[in-house]
Image: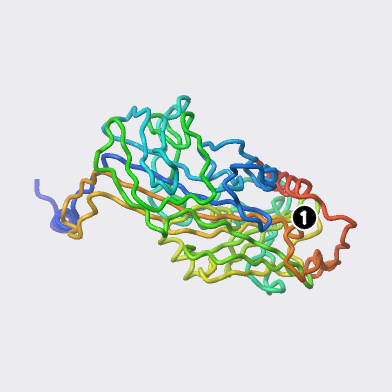
């Protein structure tokens, strides 16, 4: 049976296009072995983070900033927020899906003996698929009660058109979706799964020394791990220095200043605070409306570069930002500043320059770097700065009198956290 002419021509064109596409692009196969290394430095109150090898005032404060004071090294600290310098490693071998243990040879400047990786004994299920894009994603939304007030930008005073207000009691699904759209390009990094040895592990939980460096030659070994899995980590992906953020208040505005980090690709600051029993205030350093819920984490290099062009992130030479007067009320606030490092993606052999050539890498590596500081305004004052009783006045509202004694961090952070969970229904 003959097809009508028009559909016949269309099918022919589709076939030719498919053939042409196949002729232009070679087949890329997954690597025989894959490793993920996450590197993080956390600090707080403008104080440098140490290796947590001894008593530290920041260790006692760690639980207030999302991590808890770590008595020993453990896998997952690069996400926990505990002050210190942390490294997480995950290794996967397709030739041995049940790989139970492995080793990573590291430079003498990091630790004196190879890292002993061990697969978690209680992990089950199939690892989730990797996040293989850097698109803007929408955050989950629900309908509790309360209000969210969003401010943005570095300036002494609140800019016209702010804040952006979301009233949970009356917001439509479209309002919720629009408010909570947030940029995020966080791909899979070090993770815990069955058959994938990790470090730190139960058999090797050594702390990262204060002056440790990852720069130099590394190699993975183990049953089913290719002997060629050797690579060098350059200085651009070494452990980042601690962000030493100081805050100062003058005329109601909060000045944030931090040390310059030479390997930082960009910076971003975000804060939240409570204003009354059912209002949460959010502020970010972005020049455009942005909640920042997905940004205080690892991001891909292309995404960081794009958001720099969009003025969402601060340029790598930036060392200060001002939270406008009146953004945060008298209930307390907490701010975080992140320095994005340069992500490293290696593969052997490298992908051919010819797009028609097939590619079968023996191994691949993804290494991510960040440095994050947490600040409670008033507890890390800059010299010459004084607290102003008018600082807590929202734009167009009455000034909040200064209390006789500033609340402790333990008093501030639970209020903001409880309110955020109440507003978001979590």
* Res 272 visible: no
Please tell me which residue is depicted at 26% across the width and 39% down the height of the picture. Answer: 32
Quadrant containing the C terminus in the rendered view: top right
Instruction: Assess disc 1: are there few (<14), some (14-19) or many (≥20) residues with their C-alpha within 10 Å of its C-alpha.
Output: many
Please tell me which residue is depicted at 64% across the width and 70% down the height of the picture. Answer: 154
- Establish if 27 lies above or below 386: above
* Res 292 visible: yes
- Establish if 249 lies above or below 373: below
Left or right of 352, for residue 197: right
Observer-nearest of 388 and 264: 264
Return the x and y of residue 103 as percentages of the image width and height. 36, 35
Give the tally of numbered discs.
1
Task: Name the residue carrying label 1.
Answer: 332
* Residue 188, quarter of picture: top left
Quadrant containing the N terminus in the rendered view: top left
Residue found at the far left of this picture: 1
Left or right of 344, for residue 202: right
Q: Secondary structure at mark 1?
A: loop
Return the x and y of residue 421 as percentages of the image width and height. 68, 44
Observer-nearest of 15 and 321: 321
Left or right of 41, for residue 172: right
- Colour theme: rainbow
Please tell me which residue is depicted at 61% across the width and 45% down the height of the picture. Answer: 82
Observer-nearest of 336 and 108: 108
Residue found at the far right of this picture: 404
* Residue 134, quarter of picture: bottom left
Return the x and y of residue 256 as percentages of the image width and height. 67, 66
Residue found at the far top of this picture: 121
Please tell me which residue is depicted at 41% across the width and 38% down the height of the picture. Answer: 113
Return the x and y of residue 411 as percentages of the image width and height. 79, 47
Left or right of 141, for residue 103: left
């Amino acid at each position: 049976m003959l097809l009508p002419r028009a559909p016949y021509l269309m099918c022919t064109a589709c076939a030719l296009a498919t053939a042409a596409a196949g002729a232009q692009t070679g087949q890329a196969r997954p690597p025989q072995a894959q490793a993920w290394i996450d590197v993080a430095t956390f600090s707080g109150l403008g104080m440098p983070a140490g290796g947590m090898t001894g008593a530290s005032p920041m260790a006692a404060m760690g639980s207030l900033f999302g991590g808890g004071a770590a008595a020993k090294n453990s896998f997952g600290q690069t996400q926990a927020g505990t002050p210190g310098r942390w490294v997480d490693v995950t290794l996967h071998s397709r030739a041995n899906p049940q790989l139970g243990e492995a080793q990573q040879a590291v430079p003498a400047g990091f630790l004196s003996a190879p890292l002993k990786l061990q697969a978690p004994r209680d992990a089950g299920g199939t690892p989730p698929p990797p996040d293989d894009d850097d698109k803007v994603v929408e955050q989950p939304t629900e309908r509790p009660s309360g209000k969210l007030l969003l401010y943005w930008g570095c300036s002494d005073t609140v800019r016209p058109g702010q804040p952006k207000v979301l009233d949970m009691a009356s917001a439509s699904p479209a309002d919720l979706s629009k408010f909570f759209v947030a940029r995020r390009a966080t791909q899979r990094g070090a993770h815990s799964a069955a058959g994938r040895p990790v470090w730190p592990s139960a058999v090797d939980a050594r702390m990262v020394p204060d002056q440790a460096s990852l720069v130099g030659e590394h190699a993975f070994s183990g049953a089913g791990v290719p002997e060629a899995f050797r690579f060098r980590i350059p200085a651009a992906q070494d452990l980042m220095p601690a962000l030493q953020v100081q805050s100062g208040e003058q005329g109601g505005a909060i000045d944030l200043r931090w040390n310059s980090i030479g390997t930082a690709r960009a910076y971003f600051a975000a804060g939240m605070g409570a204003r009354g029993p059912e209002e949460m205030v959010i502020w970010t350093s972005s020049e455009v409306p942005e909640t920042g819920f997905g940004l205080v984490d690892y991001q891909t290099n292309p995404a960081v570069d794009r958001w720099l062009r969009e003025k969402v992130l601060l340029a790598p030479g930036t060392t200060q930002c001002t939270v406008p007067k009146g953004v945060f009320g008298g209930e307390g606030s907490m701010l975080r500043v992140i320095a994005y490092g340069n992500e490293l993606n290696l593969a052997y052999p490298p992908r051919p320059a010819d797009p028609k050539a097939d590619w079968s890498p023996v191994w691949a590596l993804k290494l991510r770097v960040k440095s994050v500081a947490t600040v409670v305004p008033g507890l890390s004052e800059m010299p010459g700065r004084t607290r102003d009783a008018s600082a807590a006045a929202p734009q167009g509202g009455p000034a909040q009198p200064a209390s006789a004694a500033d609340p402790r961090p333990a008093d501030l952070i639970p209020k903001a956290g409880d309110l955020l969970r109440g507003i978001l229904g979590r």
